């Protein structure tokens, strides 16, 4: 079974549109994240939620709005898409290795292309 | 803000050779982790080293950590073509983890 899943895998859309990406984890983790990976492969954290509460909100345009309906889901809604939003968006959740430090489990990514 | 910075950005070696990747960071950490990303896929956790550890092994992987220099290295011994991927270090600062831009490793058969 997939631990962290994202939909859709690919998203091609026009500038100005609004789109959502969904993420679900079945690992029972309390913390979930959204990352953006640009064309240079740099991975930047966007948001982090712990038990449905926002705990990290990096400098991200307010066109990006995360929503966590429950602990297992963290969706990302993007309004008024711009060309620069084209990237791969990764969802992740974090849990502890045998009670030790947290490690992250990543979804397969959503490749967003804004035309 | 970006934390881990990997070096080199790209590395190309022959199968059987060893590959060494370095990571530098800026602030205090609880632990440092290395992840691997195959092309078109999400990151996968490889190995974790705590701030009070200096070296750790896992199979063909060896990680070192020098907290005085704020640096870590990942050594992959006897590389295989299947090791071709991007490798990222990530620093655990308590509330979150910060990733660098990664090292792109190509292992030629």
Image (cartoon, rainbow, N blue to C red):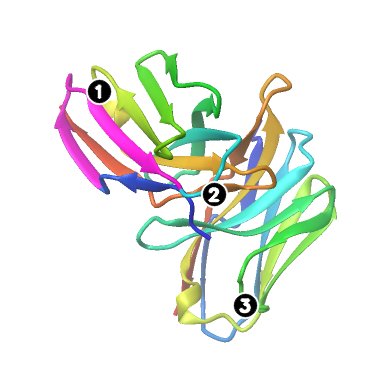
Label 2 in the same subunit as label 1 = yes
Label 3 in the same subunit as label 1 = no
The main secondary structure of the magenta stretch is strand
Q: Secondary structure at mark 2?
A: strand
Q: Position of residue A70 (x, y in %)?
A: 86, 50
Name the residue at 46% across, 70% down. Answer: A86
Q: Which mark is residue A61?
A: 3
Where is mark 1, residue-wise?
A: B80
Magenta span: B10-25
Where is mark 2, residue-wise?
A: B98
Q: Nearer the viewer, residue A31 or A12?
A: A31
Q: Quadrant of the C terminus of chain A?
A: bottom left
Q: Secondary structure at mark 1?
A: loop
Q: Give the left or right position of residue B81, taking residue A15 as reference.
A: left
Can you name the residue that lies furthest to the front here? B68
The subunit letter for the residue under badge 2 reads B
The answer to whether residue A23 is magenta is no
The subunit letter for the residue under badge 3 reads A
Q: Quadrant of the N terminus of chain A?
A: top right
Q: Give the left or right position of residue A43, taking residue A6 as reference.
A: left
Pointer 2 local density, CA inside 10 Å: few below 14, some 14–19, many at least 20: many
Q: Are marks 2 and 1 in contact (CB under 8 Å)?
A: no
Q: Position of residue B75 (x, y in %)?
A: 31, 25
């Amino acid at each position: 079974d997939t631990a962290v899943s994202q939909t859709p895998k690919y998203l091609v859309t026009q500038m100005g549109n609004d789109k959502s990406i969904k993420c679900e984890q079945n690992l029972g983790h309390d913390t979930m994240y959204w990352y953006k990976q640009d064309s240079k492969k740099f991975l930047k954290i966007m948001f982090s939620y712990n038990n449905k509460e926002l705990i990290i909100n990096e400098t991200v345009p307010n066109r990006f709005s995360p929503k966590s309906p429950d602990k297992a889901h963290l969706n990302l809604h993007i309004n008024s898409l711009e060309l620069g939003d084209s990237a791969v968006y990764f969802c992740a959740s974090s849990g502890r290795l045998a009670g030790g430090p947290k490690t992250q489990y990543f979804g397969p990514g959503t490749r967003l292309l804004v035309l | 803000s970006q934390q881990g910075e990997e070096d080199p950005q790209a590395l190309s070696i022959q199968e059987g050779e060893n590959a060494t990747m370095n990571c530098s960071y800026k602030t205090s950490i609880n632990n440092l982790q290395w992840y691997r990303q195959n092309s078109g896929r999400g990151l996968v956790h490889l190995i974790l080293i705590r701030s009070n550890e200096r070296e750790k092994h896992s199979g063909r992987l060896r990680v070192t950590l020098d907290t005085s220099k704020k640096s870590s290295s990942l050594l992959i011994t006897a590389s295989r073509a299947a090791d071709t991927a991007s490798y990222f270090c990530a620093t655990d600062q308590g509330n979150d983890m910060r990733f660098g831009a990664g090292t792109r490793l190509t292992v030629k058969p």
